[in-house]
Image (cartoon, grey):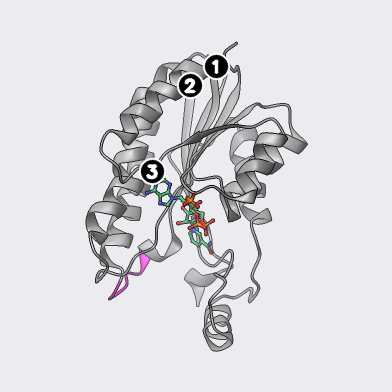
Amino acid sequence: MQLKNAILISGAGQRIGYYLAKQFLTQTDYPVIFSYRTERAGVAELVRLGGVAIQADFNQPDAIDSFITEVKARVGRLRALIHNASVWLDDSAPASFEQQMRLHVELPYRLNQALCELLQANESADIISISDAKVARGSAHQIAYLASKAALQNMTKSFALAYAPRVKVNDIAPALIMFNEGDTESYRQQRLQQNLIPIEPGPEVIWQTINYIMQNTYLTGQVIRLDGGQSLV
Ligand SMILES: NC(=O)c1ccc[n+]([C@@H]2O[C@H](COP(=O)([O-])OP(=O)(O)OC[C@H]3O[C@@H](n4cnc5c(N)ncnc54)[C@H](OP(=O)(O)O)[C@@H]3O)[C@@H](O)[C@H]2O)c1
């Protein structure tokens, strides 16, 4: 049987995506379907909780097409489409531009178009992307990363225009949410000092913002800066 009123999350095998999928599965009645690339304990845990997992490495040719086909086979109606999958590469990394443009621009663009009918079929629906607060500032070494996240933010406005009133389209632009395992103590301190609220907030604040967006019936086309006040410093 096809899923109704489902939440689709890209890249939910770890960290923020995993946390969001787990919250939906344990705190709500929404069925969850998600993509993952790497086999991880988190993927097995989400499946054990009832999530539907689809493996996809979007760097591979035709992976986006195959993913769309599989989602359409499993889902009848979508309550929310959450663009979380991401890669953070320096400009010196091989194929940095291509990889980040594919994951942050082509994938959401294609999913929004291909899954529009499934979203429109639901009583209400949301598209929510996760970009980056640093888009507003720039970076000397992550030019492609920020260009791709800027494009993702911009698509919020165009898809909001295209899909109103039934589907709301919004973006969350976070500053520091979670450190990476290898981050040094001095790097952590330097990042914390960039914010008015100098904490590592964790994925709970993304979950709160997703709930705010989904429950709000009058919010579309917006980029929500979730930055601990960084823009004022
Ligand atoms: N963490 C922060 O402080 C922070 C700050 C600003 C913005 N954000 C944004 O918030 C979102 C979540 O952040 P995060 O730190 O949880 O990200 P993350 O740990 O890097 O996880 C992103 C997910 O994307 C998936 N992914 C990467 N490349 C892929 C590919 N080629 N094909 C398929 N899947 C791929 C990964 O899958 P596998 O693990 O399965 O390989 C991974 O699970 C991202 O959009 C990020 O840009 C985060």
For label 2, being within 8 Å of ligand 1 is answered: no
Say if 195 sits above or below 123 in the image.
below
Q: Which residues are magenta?
A: 136-141
The residue carrying mark 2 is 119
Q: Is the shortest distance between ligand 1 and the CB of mark 3 under 8 Å?
A: yes
Q: Nearer the viewer, mark 1 or mark 3?
A: 3
**Mark 2 vs mark 3, CA separation in Å:** 24 Å
Label located before the other in sequence (2 or 3): 3
What residue do we see at 27% from left, 50% from top? 101
Secondary element at image label 1: loop
Q: Which mark is residue 122?
A: 1
Considering the numbered disc 3 on the image, is that residue within a helix, a strand or a loop?
Answer: loop
In contact (CB < 8 Å): disc 1 and disc 3: no
The residue nearer to you, when weighing 177 against 197, is: 177
Give the residue pinned by disc 3.
Answer: 57
Asked if residue 117 lies left or right of residue 218, the reply is left
Ligand 1 within 8 A of label 1's CB? no
